[in-house]
Amino acid sequence: MAIIKDIAGIAKGMSITFREMFKPTVVENYPDGKGPLRGAVFQERFRGVHVLQRDENGLEKCVACFLCAAACPSNCIYIEAAENTAENRISGAERYAKVYNIDYNRCIFCGYCVEACPTDAITHGHGFELATYDINSLVYRKDQMLEKVGGDMLVLGPFKGAMTPHTRIPLNQGICGAAASSGQTIVIDDVHNDSRYLACSIETKSEIVVPVFVHGKVVGELDIDSHFLAAFGPDDRTLCEHAAAVLGKFIESRPS
Ligand code: SF4
Ligand code: SF4
């Protein structure tokens, strides 16, 4: 009996091996894939190159309080503060960061700087292509990290439903920003369990966001909210992705 049990155990174990052997191999198509990430796939919580944020008026959120530099265990943040004046207003407070450098030779992407910031001025973006032959180029300056004015921003287009306060969303914020910057469809069964969610309405429970590609680049997205939890199944995803593909092809076919 023991032998039969052993054989049955081995057969069961090998059945998994044989089943997996005939499944198609899945690989990431980086750097030849679609979207800004060129096919790279990573979790949304991935901590990439920092982004220095602006407020809704376009002013820099950083007020040069140095708390991020104090919290950094690698001592890799360098800041020089300067005073705002009536003629030269850079941030909404008294001071702004005239110089803000992060040395990526030493940064360990721990996120302590992000947690320490009282104004949400610094966040982790999704930039990941840091490899270089020149270590000097790993000292990132403020200009390289500062959120672009007018660029890298999602702008609300035609929509149906309740008005939202989020008419402009930086690419590194919210579920919409995550979908646009990753070039991936995102389906959230319960938005209140997702820290990226930018609350638009207390009634919204689940969401699907599908990027629209034109000539391999994300130019927009379809974003649908639902008042029900887990409202979007595989069929809905297929339908939305098909609609986004049709829209992308339509835009491509129009004379530029
Ligand atoms: S992520 Fe960590 S190591 Fe990097 S700058 Fe922020 S606090 Fe310093
Ligand atoms: S990024 Fe935040 S914590 Fe760092 S200096 Fe600016 S406001 Fe202060």
Image (tube, rainbow, N blue to C red):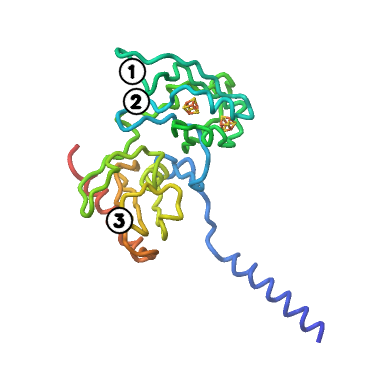
Q: Position of residue 187 (x, y in %)?
A: 40, 57
Residue 89: mark in rendering: 1
* Kind of residue at badge 3: Ile
* Quadrant where ligand 1 appears: top right
The 10 Å Cα crowd at callout 2, few under 14, some 14 to 19, many 20 or more, is some
Label 1 and label 3: CA atoms lie apart by 38 Å
Residue situated furthest front in the rendering? 94
Local secondary structure at mark 1: loop
- Name which of mark 1 and mark 3 comes first in the sequence: 1
Q: Quadrant of residue 112?
A: top right
Mark 3, residue position: 224
Of label 2 and label 1, which has the lower sequence position? Answer: 2
Amino acid carrying mark 2 in the image: Leu
Instruction: In the rendered view, tell whether residue 248 sits above or below residue 56.
Output: below
Q: Quadrant of the C terminus?
A: top left
Q: Are marks 2 and 3 in contact (CB under 8 Å)?
A: no
Residue where numbered disc 2 is placed: 59
